[in-house]
Amino acid sequence: MRIVVTNCNTTQEMTEEIVRGARAAAAPGTTVTGLTPGWGPASAEGWLDSYLSAAAVLDTLRTYDGPAYDAVVLAGFGEHGREGVRELVDVPVVDITEAAAHLACLLGRRYGVVTTLDRSCGQIEDSLETAGVARNCAAVVGTGLGVLDLAGDPGRTEAAFLTAAERARDAGAEVLVLGCAGMTGLQQAVGEKLGMPVVDGVAAAVKLAESLVTLGLTTSRAGGYQQPLPKERRWGRPARGADGA
Amino acid sequence: MRIVVTNCNTTQEMTEEIVRGARAAAAPGTTVTGLTPGWGPASAEGWLDSYLSAAAVLDTLRTYDGPAYDAVVLAGFGEHGREGVRELVDVPVVDITEAAAHLACLLGRRYGVVTTLDRSCGQIEDSLETAGVARNCAAVVGTGLGVLDLAGDPGRTEAAFLTAAERARDAGAEVLVLGCAGMTGLQQAVGEKLGMPVVDGVAAAVKLAESLVTLGLTTSRAGGYQQPLPKERRWGRPARGADGA
Amino acid sequence: MRIVVTNCNTTQEMTEEIVRGARAAAAPGTTVTGLTPGWGPASAEGWLDSYLSAAAVLDTLRTYDGPAYDAVVLAGFGEHGREGVRELVDVPVVDITEAAAHLACLLGRRYGVVTTLDRSCGQIEDSLETAGVARNCAAVVGTGLGVLDLAGDPGRTEAAFLTAAERARDAGAEVLVLGCAGMTGLQQAVGEKLGMPVVDGVAAAVKLAESLVTLGLTTSRAGGYQQPLPKERRWGRPARGADGA
Amino acid sequence: MRIVVTNCNTTQEMTEEIVRGARAAAAPGTTVTGLTPGWGPASAEGWLDSYLSAAAVLDTLRTYDGPAYDAVVLAGFGEHGREGVRELVDVPVVDITEAAAHLACLLGRRYGVVTTLDRSCGQIEDSLETAGVARNCAAVVGTGLGVLDLAGDPGRTEAAFLTAAERARDAGAEVLVLGCAGMTGLQQAVGEKLGMPVVDGVAAAVKLAESLVTLGLTTSRAGGYQQPLPKERRWGRPARGADGA
Amino acid sequence: MRIVVTNCNTTQEMTEEIVRGARAAAAPGTTVTGLTPGWGPASAEGWLDSYLSAAAVLDTLRTYDGPAYDAVVLAGFGEHGREGVRELVDVPVVDITEAAAHLACLLGRRYGVVTTLDRSCGQIEDSLETAGVARNCAAVVGTGLGVLDLAGDPGRTEAAFLTAAERARDAGAEVLVLGCAGMTGLQQAVGEKLGMPVVDGVAAAVKLAESLVTLGLTTSRAGGYQQPLPKERRWGRPARGADGA
Amino acid sequence: MRIVVTNCNTTQEMTEEIVRGARAAAAPGTTVTGLTPGWGPASAEGWLDSYLSAAAVLDTLRTYDGPAYDAVVLAGFGEHGREGVRELVDVPVVDITEAAAHLACLLGRRYGVVTTLDRSCGQIEDSLETAGVARNCAAVVGTGLGVLDLAGDPGRTEAAFLTAAERARDAGAEVLVLGCAGMTGLQQAVGEKLGMPVVDGVAAAVKLAESLVTLGLTTSRAGGYQQPLPKERRWGRPARGADGA
């Protein structure tokens, strides 16, 4: 089967890292195709970025013209858009936020999320709530590091993660979730130091997407996730380039 | 004071209707400026539309170059984007969804929302939940009419609204909320027939925006709604026109 | 329009301070009339006081024979009675507890309340819960100061407030609510020191009352807030004076 | 031991009926003393009545000068005041609303409450919520009968109760609670017809009060229910008689 | 009346201690019969023990052939099985977990539970939640002592209890619950030191059981707690002895 | 990898049916081993059965001496025991109840469960709640058919399922969950008729178990699910046979 994994930002290096993580998790017969939105934010850090990212990801999937695929993985932790993609495509859609939480619930009584900036915690909380998996979330804790800073100094990143993880554990977490697609590499290192399972959302989402495809299950059209109605839609204004605001 | 009221879709007629409603509610010294996004959906009906609308509204406000304003009213009922706008601008931001609910809570023990298509109910429920005002919402009920159909046959619209309102009342609602910016005209007619107060979100949001401005209150920067970080962002791809998908 | 603002206790000085705050918030055409109950507690601090206050406020409004008014503001933070007043009068009724919370929800993701004695926290929590606005309340924190002590030593009051506010912020609050009608004067001083918006309930309630009146909205009679049934009621025993218990 | 049972209204016949029910439930060594407030409403039906009743009951207990007692039972179903009485007296205080719910939770997975007028349902819901026992309440249903109408036509009362009970059962109730102190006589008749346990709040409260006294337990002074602070309080205006409003 | 009190483990000494506590709480006319399961764990500490204990307790009651009894008290704090016993017997069934919580709710606004090992906290939380009394539980805190260690060094046990109790109080508890049947002796000593009421589940359950019996109330058969269906059931494998795993 | 799938009852035919379903869902490299408890109920229908089943399943896994396995699937829908198995074994444990709910959450906004007897609904609700996935469950509905009746008359079973499914849909379900391991065969037939995705718990659990194994994740030992403490435990009384009670 083919799974399309969409980065939520325009940074190609991050797509590549996400695709590496997805491929490491995928079953032998699964092909992973990474997509980088042609527009949107260079990194998604906050609500404005998240809404911009959601539209860009939708546009990217809407105009995708590559080989047919069997499932979509949305690789923006805590970012918006998953319900819109469920309307758009006929294959299963799994968001890494919910995916990590679903698996974490199976591994302990309470889980905690460690993410990048504190400002992202609220989005993640809301995303878990509406996905229906917030009940057993003990805490969402920020490390103070930006999305694109994660790769900079591995030691600093790991130390910041461990500090935040301890706060989550004190709040009752027995399992940790990596709260950013760019944290995938941290899983092994910190898991051993913490003595707790650490769930990576990209890997979790790939496995859940494969599961749904294998079982022949896809999004219900019987309620809120019907196909978008045919109408005029404009996806951005003509002749626009990048800007720094 | 000047309040900018943003339509969530590209339909100019609807902006005009919203502005009429806003002006009817505004205090003598308040100037209402309507904004129609230069891109996005012709009407917002469902999640894909809502996320596209959120980005378009953000872009519209980001690139706005008219006279300075004191508050923003977001006139898309149940649509996304309000937290992003709170990051973007330094003035108070009021979304008509939450605004109607806030006032409705003051008028009865439980309120109900009557909206357009059933597919919109879920978004509204989530929007009320994250805004912190879902606790006293008895029901969100659809009329089966699309956003742009509301104006078509006033008799049919009113009948559909009354039928839906009865379902909300049976679920415990003592107050009704008009669940679409395009329903503003219905308020008086159905209020009398139902014997219940009917709250229009546009009017409610204008009054709440005026209240915040008068009291010198604006969005907190102390937590999740900090200003967007400076970074590269692309707001749509170059040279794109409208399409019908 | 005329708004009647009822103090919840018999201390005339506090009524005057509340009225000053209400007038400062009111629109040019709004007349504020303060009412001091003819009986009840000298200050409301705890459940017994609160229930006594509720009956006294109801009696005060029931026997009011001044000029007609358009709305009632109940100026006892966390005190009981609002639903009874909604039954009694035909105009909108806004309680300062709920009013502050409604506006605070518009200004940040979570708000906190700073109040007088710790023993008042529980009443406030219940009042926010039943008003439907507790979901986004991060904490209700006491300063340890009694209602009538607030005015005594401004420096001590401000210091106590700031200490309590920090606890609320640590619990996640991004916006603060002044949890006592007698705290109105603190708003500006502490807002700047804390870098957070500070909402005063009296001011908030005045704006919400004006909003409802302007929009022609009043309490629903369709459910729980019907007019009191005609029956024999005795409002206190004959020939009773004050006592110190 | 001696238990004081306070009626919530001024109707002496109802006090007598409540006392009969309390005595039927009491252990051999328990003396039941009924108290009728010297002021307040003739019956408590709605929020205004409830707040008036709360102050009158507090005043009645405050000025009580009979023999010492070991516990207080508050016999107003869904009425306010229990937290204030907990501040006032040093013995255990049990409200019939919470008492019935506590026992009902032990008898089935979900319970339902059948009460008098529909307008009382909201108060009961709030009372159960703040007492901490609403989680397993499936429904609160009104019979449409007023408090003082219950005794009028036993056949009509029973029929109205059975109709309401069926609605509660359809909502999931496996146990019923009599939602008015004046319904005590119905317990046996309707229990058999419904094939469900029926809990009377007065009887339940007497047993819980006896239990607490026997175990040497009384209200905690460690938090919200501290003794009322000494201060000036006026319990009603001088020289007031009854009125019909 | 006769109340059967079932220990949840096979340790006879603990049954005796529980029976002593039950008898101290019982009314003069109440006979307490202790039952020790013939199989199961020597102490219940964790989920595996709890499920084993539930089956053993059910088997013990199923095969009981002593004098008829009027109620069952299940004396395993936080242990499973109560719903099954409600199906099995025709008399009221009270679990000490829920019993302590029910009485604690009457004594303060929030209660806390102090239990043995930290690993037991989760079970207790779930047990309170499904019993419908978790809403006012501020915290469940472990002492770090095992069930059978409680009796070892009274000073150490009391000190550990006091430390845990302070954590519960800091979380808002105004009343304490002894979270293990083996803690019964602690009640008086720590209650005075803490200045808070301390509720023992065994005593609470005895009083609640007596109350239900006196009122003629027993488990509803109208919903989930119908009698077990007749079918083949095997209660353990032939010829099994004890083991140490 | 090898997955052990445990039936919750002693009916060998049902184990075989479950194993067939598990194998149909398993990946090529997965070996499925079915286990039938040597004791327990012939079918699990109600709380007593469920607790007996939990102990029997734990005993079966505890004394298992077959080839090593990589994960356990617990195939009793709504039955107890999963937390105990998580303590007992070092490999991932997935219960079919939670598994079906986790996948259902990915397919629609709300899901519903259709199960056998009405008496089982409560257990399922509690199981979903404590697993952390009840938030998006719209309804749990019984068909009125016993576990062992499902196979009897396929037409009757399908009709009863469809009737119950419509009730779930009316309550808001967009996805259905088969609420019994013995319903596996129904999935395809009813899915088409209903136009909704239908999730089978056995298949879901196999895929989730495979996912966890592939990702190297297993139950956290950092909190509530530590290994059982060494102590004396007796798993049933000596020399017991089957009986019909």
Image (tube, coloured by chain):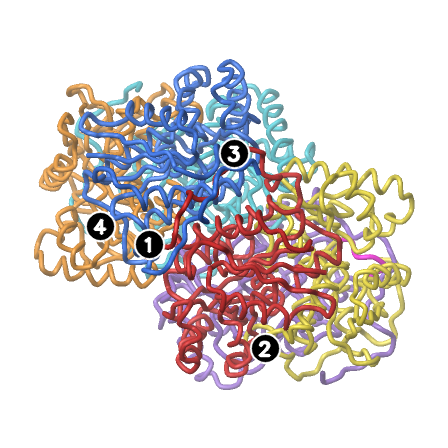
Chain colours: A orange, B cyan, C purple, D yellow, E red, F blue
Chain bearing mark 3: E
Residue at the spot 60% in from the left edge and 44% down from the top edge: E87
Badge 3 crowding class, 10 Å Cα cut-off, few under 14, some 14 to 19, many 20 or more, is some
Circles 3 and 2 on the same subunit: no
Estimate the x, y position of residue D21 in percent, counting from the top left: 83, 59
Name the element at disc 1: loop
Chain bearing mark 1: F
- Nearer the observer: mark 1 or 4; the answer is 1
Q: Which residue is mark 1?
A: F225
- Nearer the observer: mark 2 or 4; the answer is 4
Badge 1 crowding class, 10 Å Cα cut-off, few under 14, some 14 to 19, many 20 or more, is many
User: What residue range appears in magenta?
Assistant: D41-45
Residue at the spot 68% in from the left edge and 62% down from the top edge: C81
- State whether residue C27 appears in this view: no
Q: Amino acid under label 3?
A: Glu
Q: Can you tell which mark lies on residue D221?
A: 2
Q: Can you tell which mark lies on residue E232?
A: 3
Badge 4 crowding class, 10 Å Cα cut-off, few under 14, some 14 to 19, many 20 or more, is many
Distance from label 2 to label 4 (Cα)?
45 Å
Q: Amino acid under label 2?
A: Arg
Estimate the x, y position of residue F33 in percent, counting from the top left: 28, 31
Estimate the x, y position of residue C212 in percent, counting from the top left: 60, 50
Indicate whether residue A244 is drawn in magenta: no
Q: Which residue is mark 4?
A: A198
Q: Amino acid under label 1?
A: Tyr
